[in-house]
Amino acid sequence: MIRAALGALQDLGFQIEESQAAVGLLVGSKIGNGRIRAQVSVRGLPGQNASVIRATFQHIVPRPGAMLAVGEVLEDPELYQGFFERVAQSAFLTAHDI
């Protein structure tokens, strides 16, 4: 499922900045109307052939004079739906060797 999530982020125009498959973590960003960062966590469910995927998208807001920027969580349902639809499609295609 980590590959499906990675592909979904790339399909949405994100560049992957960090990938730690062993712990199920992906971080990517894209520049558009400001900088948007995506963080995705994938973990398997013990004793089941299933995974839980969590995604957060943030608009990165620079703070003048500060060393760190602030991330404002994006709550646009279309962004999340688009991501999870791509993940589901990729998982389906992989499961059916298409």
Image (spheres, rainbow, N blue to C red):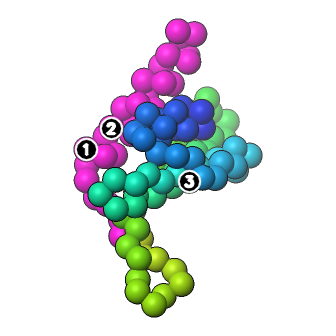
- In the rendered image, which residue does mark 3 sit on? 27
Q: Nearer the viewer, residue 41 or 58?
A: 58
Q: Is residue 45 left or right of residue 8?
A: right
Q: Sequence order check: which comes first, mark 3 or mark 1? A: 3
Is 38 contained in the magenta span? no
Category of crowding for the residue at label 2, using alpha-carbon neighbours closer than 10 angstroms: few (below 14), some (14–19), many (at least 20): some
> In the figure, 75 relative to 47: above or below?
below
Dot 2 falls on a residue whose secondary structure is helix
Q: Position of residue 91 (x, y in %)?
A: 51, 24
Category of crowding for the residue at label 3, using alpha-carbon neighbours closer than 10 angstroms: few (below 14), some (14–19), many (at least 20): many
User: At 61% from the left edge and 45% from the top edge, which residue is drawn?
Assistant: 43
Q: Position of residue 64 (x, y in %)?
A: 40, 86
Task: Tell me the CA gap for discs 3 and 1.
Answer: 19 Å
- In the rendered image, which residue does mark 2 sit on? 82
Looking at the rendered structure, the kind of residue marked 1 is: Glu
Tags 2 and 3 in contact by the CB under 8 Å rule? no
Q: Is residue 44 left or right of residue 85?
A: right
Determine which of the numbered discs, if any, sits on residue 78 in the image. Answer: 1
Q: Sequence order check: which comes first, mark 2 or mark 3? A: 3
Which residues are drawn in magenta?
72-98
Magenta stretch, main secondary structure class: helix
Category of crowding for the residue at label 1, using alpha-carbon neighbours closer than 10 angstroms: few (below 14), some (14–19), many (at least 20): few
> In the figure, 49 relative to 16: above or below?
above
Q: Position of residue 33 (x, y in %)?
A: 29, 57
